Structures are given as structure tokens and as C-alpha cells.
Image (tube, rainbow, N blue to C red):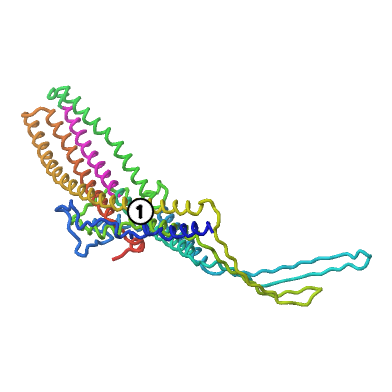
Amino acid sequence: MRMLPSILILTASALCYGCDVGGTLPSSEKPDVKAWENKGADTIAAESGKVDTQWWRSLKDPVLDRLLREAAGSNLDLKIAGLRMKEAQAQAGRASAALFPEVGVTGALTGEGRQSSRGGPDAASTRSELGISGIWDLDLFGGKRAELEASEANLGNAEASRRQAVQTLIADVARTYVEVRAQQQLLELTQKNLRLQQETLRATRIQFEAKAAAKLDVLRAQAQVSSTQAELPAIRASLAARQHRIAVLLGKPPQSIDAALKKPAAVPSFSDKIVLQTPIWTMASRPDIQAAEARLREQAALRSARAADIFPKLSLSAFFGLGTATLYSSATPWNLGANLAAPLLNFGRIESDIEAADARAQQALQRYRKTVLEALEEVENALVQYGEQKRRVASLEQSSASQREAARLARLKYDAGDAAFIDVLIAEERLLQAESGVVQARAAATRAAIDLYTAMGVVAPVETLTSKGD
């Protein structure tokens, strides 16, 4: 009788599990954030709170549109995520099947013989049996249903992870494409300035031979040409690496560079204001938050499944068939049975399993909270970054225009004999730096916008990516 109070106490503790983590829905754990703090003049709030999932079309770049369609159909990470989702679907199907009886066909054929001790004839017999058997583990206390719930939550995690793979793919292709165009612009700009500097060097040498320029001017012009030439290998290497990256993102060998990426083009930029969806929509649509929520529900369900191990398990079995034997007449064998098993003495194994499952559920809850906070942080950081990059572009464009005019005036003054040659070289070098800065700033601003859309959890369905649309 001493065992009965212990069993009752353990049963009561198992029933209380779920009043802690399991009773707190993930939706109630989301912070109450109404608006973004760092919303700037370059952004506007979406009227419905939600933005267009195909945000990259605002760049109006057909090449990027096509690359994204190709990536959606051939990217290997996306295919892996799809296969993981199929695996989770199969696991959920198996967990669902465990709730129902298992029925099978059984058959047997046996023979036996016996020799008489008095030298008489041997006695032999054969027996055959064929029938249908079944067994059903009744889920009286919800353990299998909890495992099914965990499997369904795992499927939700796989689906969210696939959406996150789509989001990452779109962002990676778009960012890398912008970087390709930026490197092409830098390469063209550097080569253009190199040609001008080589012309300056040639003219300076002619002036030196005519005793109209000093040897120092020739050396300075030569040094400027060499310095500009030294920048080209790094730009070419960076361009090639990004072209190779896009090929791999499209599921192709790095040598298969898209023909459109070999022709220089302008850096795409968002001409309109970035449309912001609300924090509520962001927390609801970000795939990583959805995945964290699904993992939380999975662990909570697994904890319930472990708590059900405390209770007895009841299974039913049955057999019905036909049988024949040489020494007996034919018969119709059948049987029905029930099996009841309950834990009696396991030295705390079940209770330890429950505590471990509860700790895992608590960890999942903390990871969920952390994911939500980090998501909000990413959006706020992306808003600041985008606003500052836009201001940087405006400043550098103004600086580039001033440097262009300064270089023109320095050349005119040098030709008129009113300025030293070093003034021309300095003005041209600063002009190259300013123009390069504009290209890099425009690319950084576009990348910041891409990061902002990604941080808000704006994900297009794969079906819209693989179709050409309007």
C-alpha cells in the first residue's frame, strides 16, 4: 500500500506539467510593438500593414527577375529544404498511423513425426494455419496523440525552414547581383580614368622632351598610372567571385557564368520609397519566428508524450483464420486478448525523462523569445542603415560633382600656366575616388534596402518566383 501514494503523487505531478510552458501560447510572448522607431523619410507604411512579396520588381531589372526565376527552380539549398519537408511529412504520417490498429496476414506450416518403440510404422502429421491477426495499442492517455502533435509541429518547422531558404536565396541572388553591377561600374570607371591618365602621361613626356615640363611631372604622372593599374586586378577578382557565386546559387558550375552578367550594366536602385509592413506583420511573417514557434510546440508536445508514460498502456490483439491437420479435422482457430502494462519500479527514469523534456521545452521557449527580439533588432538596424546610406549617396554625388568641376578647372589652369602639374594629378585622383565612392554607396544603399525587406520577413511563394508573371 505504500506504493499507491507514490504513484498518485507522480501522476498528479505529470498532470501539472503543461501548466508552465505549455500553457503559454507563443503569440502571447510577442512584444507589443506598434511602430518602427527608426522609420525615415525614405520609407512609408503599408496601408494594409503588409507589403508586396515581390519587392525586387521595384528595381525594374529584367535580368535580376530572370535570375531569381532560375534560382527558384534549380537552387540546391532550396531542393534540400523541400526534401526535408517531405521527410517531415512522412514522419507525421507515421505518427498518425500509430493511432490505428495494425493488421497483418500470418501463415504457418509445420510437420512432426514419431517412430514406434515396438517397430511399428512411423506416425507423422502436418499442420497448416492461415489467418488475419491484428494488434491495437490504445492511446488512453494521449501519448501517441502528443507524438502526432509533435510530428505535425516538426512539419511546420520544415515548412517555415523552406520559406526561410526561399528568403535567403532571394536576398543572396539580389545582393550578389548588385555587387556584380557595382564591380563592373568600378572596373569601367577605373579603366576610363586609366586611359585619361595614360594620355596625361604621354602628353607630359612630350612636354618633357620639348623642355616644357619637368622630370618630376613625368614621374608623378607615371606613379599615378601605376597606382590606378594596381587597382584593376582586385576589382576583376572581386567581379569574377561574384559571377561565380551567382552561377552556384543557380545550381550551376561556377564556370557557367550567365551571358547577361558578362555585359556591364548600371547598379539597380529603388527609385520609390521603401514600403514598410508593421511590426505585427513582421513577427507573423518572418520564417525564423515561425520555425521557432513550431519548435516550441514540438517540444511542448514531446513533454506531454513523456508525461503519458506514467500511465498504464493497454493493447488489444486478435486472430481469426483457418487451420488443417492430417490427424485432426479442419478447424477455425481464433483468439482475442488484452494486455495491460503499467510502470511499477523504474528508479525515477520516467520522472527524469519528463524533467528533461520540460527543460527542452523551456529552452525552446527562450529561443523563441530571443528570435522575436533579434528580428525586431534586425529591422531597426536595417532602417538606420538604409537611411544613412541614402544620405551618404546624396553627399557623395554632390562631392563627385564638385570634384569633377575641380579637375576641369585644374586642367584649364595648368594649360594656362596658372597651376602646377601636381594640382592636376591630385584633382584627378580625388575625382576617381569620389566617382568610385558614388558607385559603392549606391550599391550599399540597394543592399541595405534588400536587407530591410529580408529583415521584415517579406517572402514570395516559390510559385510566384518560377512563373514569369505579368
Circle 1: element type: helix
Q: Residues within 10 Å of mark 1 (few under 14, many from 20)?
A: many
- The residue that mark 1 highlights is 365
Membership of 184 in magenta stretch: yes
> Most extreme residue toward the front, as rendered?
1
Query: 146 above or below 266?
Result: below
> Most extreme residue toward the right, as rendered?
119
Q: x, y percentage for residue 281?
A: 26, 60
The kind of secondary structure the magenta stretch mainly shows is: helix
Query: 318 above or below 349?
Result: below
Using the rendered image of the protein, determine whether residue 149 is visible from the camera's viewpoint: yes
Q: Quadrant of residue 131?
A: bottom right
Figure quadrant of the C terminus: bottom left
Figure quadrant of the N terminus: bottom right
Q: Is residue 177 left or right of residue 3?
A: left
Q: x, y percentage for residue 117?
A: 91, 63
Q: x, y percentage for residue 157?
A: 39, 58
Q: Quadrant of residue 296?
A: bottom left
Q: Which residues are magenta?
A: 177-206
Q: Is residue 430 left or right of residue 66?
A: left
The residue located at (19%, 26%) in the rendering is 220
Q: Nearer the viewer, residue 307 or 293?
A: 307
Query: 115 above or below 454?
Result: below
Name the amino acid type tagged 1.
Leu
